[in-house]
Amino acid sequence: MTNPITHCGFIAIVGQPNVGKSTLLNCILGKKLSITSDKPQTTRHSITGIKSIGEAQLVFVDTPGLHRGGKRALNRVMNKTAKSVLSDVDVVLFVVNALQWDQQDEAVLQLLKKNSAPIILVINKIDKVKQRERLLPFIEAISQKLAFAKIIPISAQKGTQVEDLEHEIIQYLPESPHMYDDDQLTDRSDGFIASEIIREKLTRSLGEELPYALTVGIELMEEEEDQLNIAAVIWVEREGQKGIVVGKGGEVLKKVGTQARIDMERYFEQKVFLKLWVKVKSNWSDDEKLLNHLGYGEQ
Ligand code: GDP
Ligand code: MG
């Protein structure tokens, strides 16, 4: 008996903040892994999502935002990560908002021009387009900018044409054995998932007030009988930011802790006991060594 031919490869999802990269990944994976938010730059780590469809396995790397400027060490590390991820994938999904094209999209495009992997242009949020006839000239104009392998309009939120996109991606995956078990969703550690859940709740609670240079470190994660004990530290840069994160009478931190615990119990499918602290580490975002230690330098 001969084994069936299998395909497997890496896919990067790029695009400026808020175009719906995380929503698209979640839609494809069918389980909430990547963190979505109205606030740009929630996903600082590149998250790997895995989707197996028949003989094909799609391995997604959600690249950290392609930031311009880059004066601070934090931006430098994130840019370096994005570029190294891009040079190592089989397909790139370039996500843009329907009927919008601005300088930030242009900047991402310039970066992609240096890349050799096929690029699928994903035009997202078509559910928001009231006048459908405006879509065709938009597609026509963008198609002049680069030799895209394919252009696919979708709604990541509603799932419209996302299956078509998946099948299109498969066309570009190399013949290869599957790298992961077919029921595996991510190669990220439980600790990483836990820290991203906390980060998401902080973003939702604090909105615009969320300190830019904030990170979450998991200090302890251990099972005790039927319970999972998790201790996490929220690192900020200044005392004032600590006050914001803790909130009046500790109410923000308490709310974040409760919401995060509920999500963690759902994800880990067991009872979770979560302990949260806020600590001040001044200038940490200028310290690349510490960033690497916290996991921002990996990949
Ligand atoms: P990212 O920064 O590119 O990862 O963007 P997110 O996935 O976090 O999405 C940013 C915002 O756009 C969120 O409020 C999403 O709910 C919203 N969004 C994403 N996809 C769609 C879509 O297809 N239609 C609509 N109407 N909104 C969307
Ligand atoms: Mg995102």
Image (cartoon, rainbow, N blue to C red):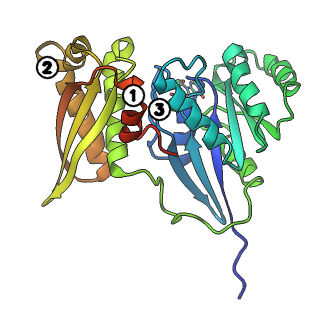
Q: Is residue 159 left or right of residue 75?
A: right
Residue 67 placement, left or right of 111:
left
Q: Quadrant of the N terminus?
A: bottom right
Which of labels 1 and 3 is toward the front? Answer: 1
Q: At numbered mark 1, what does the secondary structure look like: helix, strand or loop?
A: loop
Q: Residue furthest bottom?
A: 1
Label 2, label 3: how many angstroms apart (C-alpha)?
26 Å
Q: Is disc 2 placed on a helix, strand or loop?
A: helix
The residue labelled by disc 2 is: 250
Please provide percent x and percent y for residue 65. Answer: 56, 28
Mark 2–mark 1 Cα distance, whole angstroms, equals 29 Å
Residue 197 screen position, x and y as percent: 34, 37
Identified at 73% across, 20% down, the residue is: 106
Which mark is nearer the camera, 2 or 1?
1
| Residue type indicated by callout 3 | Thr
Identify which residue, 40 or 115, lies in the foreground. Answer: 115
Task: Tell me the number on the disc at residue 43.
Answer: 3
Q: Count residues near mark 2 (Cα–Cα under 10 Å), then give few for <14, some for 14-19, many for 20+.
A: few
Q: Residues within 10 Å of mark 1 (few under 14, many from 20)?
A: few
Q: Label 1, on which residue?
A: 287
Seen in the picture, residue 216 relative to 7 is either above or below; the reply is above
Residue 26 visible in image: yes
Circle number at residue 25: none
Of 212 and 7, nearer the camera is: 212
Tell me if residue 55 comes above or below residue 206 in the rendering: below
